[in-house]
Image (tube, rainbow, N blue to C red):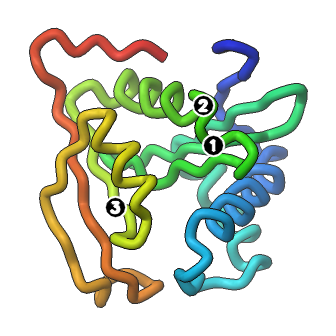
Amino acid sequence: MDTDGFLIRRAEAADGGPVAEVWLRSYDAALPTVRRAHSDDAVRAYITEVVVPAQETWLAERDGSVVGMMVLDQDWLSQLYLAPDWRGKGLGDRLVALAKERRPDGLQLWTFQVNGPAQRFYQRHGFVEVERTDGRDNEEREPDIRYVWRPTAGDTPHP
């Protein structure tokens, strides 16, 4: 689907490398103080060998380059990462709308407590905080927040 110059489509096996690069660049830009639990090579291998083939992975392209990625796993919006240059340009809004369309009964996700921009983004999209943790159960050992979105009467997601 083409939305305002972005092509959003399901990722294929050959997309694993570019999807992983977006993940790495986005994580490092958005979370410079959060220790990554895995090396760049381990992240690349996981996304290429596990995430793209086994999970509902979507990517956004602009002019042939991958600039965003999103992973849905059951009712979890488990990953949403944008290339740093593409934040704040509406691409995340389109990916969240697609997630809501694909999971009309509701979604949940985790974000780190230090990631204020992500919290504001998800709250703007109707996600509500339901839990905070001290981080002992995530690989980064970073305090996090679980958000939930449930549709309300009149919700009509638009991808």
Q: Residue furthest right?
A: 64
Q: Which secondary structure lies at badge 3?
A: strand
Which residue is found at the position 75% from the left and 45% from the top? Answer: 85
Which residue is found at the position 31% from the left and 72% from the top? Answer: 144
On the image, the x and y values in percent for residue 89 come to: 63, 31
Mark 3 — residue?
A: 110
**Number of the front mark, 3 or 2:** 2
Quarter occupied by residue 134: bottom left
**Chain-order first, disc 3 or disc 2:** 2
In the rendered structure, are the residues bearing label 2 and label 1 in contact, judged by CB atoms less than 8 Å apart? yes
In the rendering, which numbered label is found on residue 116?
A: none
The answer to whether 158 is drawn above or below residue 15 in the figure is above
Mark 1 — residue?
A: 87
Quarter occupied by residue 91: top right
On the image, the x and y values in percent for residue 27 come to: 62, 65
Amino acid, disc 1: Arg
Mark 2 — residue?
A: 91
Amino acid, disc 2: Leu
Which residue is found at the position 40% from the left and 60% from the top? Answer: 116
**In front: 122, or 110?**
122
Left of 145 or right of it: where is 141?
right
**In front: 32, or 36?**
32
Tell me how far mark 3 sits from mark 2, CA to CA. 20 Å
Which residue is found at the position 52% from the left and 25% from the top? Answer: 94
Badge 3: how crowded within 10 Å, few (<14), some, or many (20+)? Answer: some
Amino acid, disc 3: Trp
Tell me how far mark 1 sits from mark 3, CA to CA. 19 Å
On the image, the x and y values in percent for residue 17 come to: 82, 56
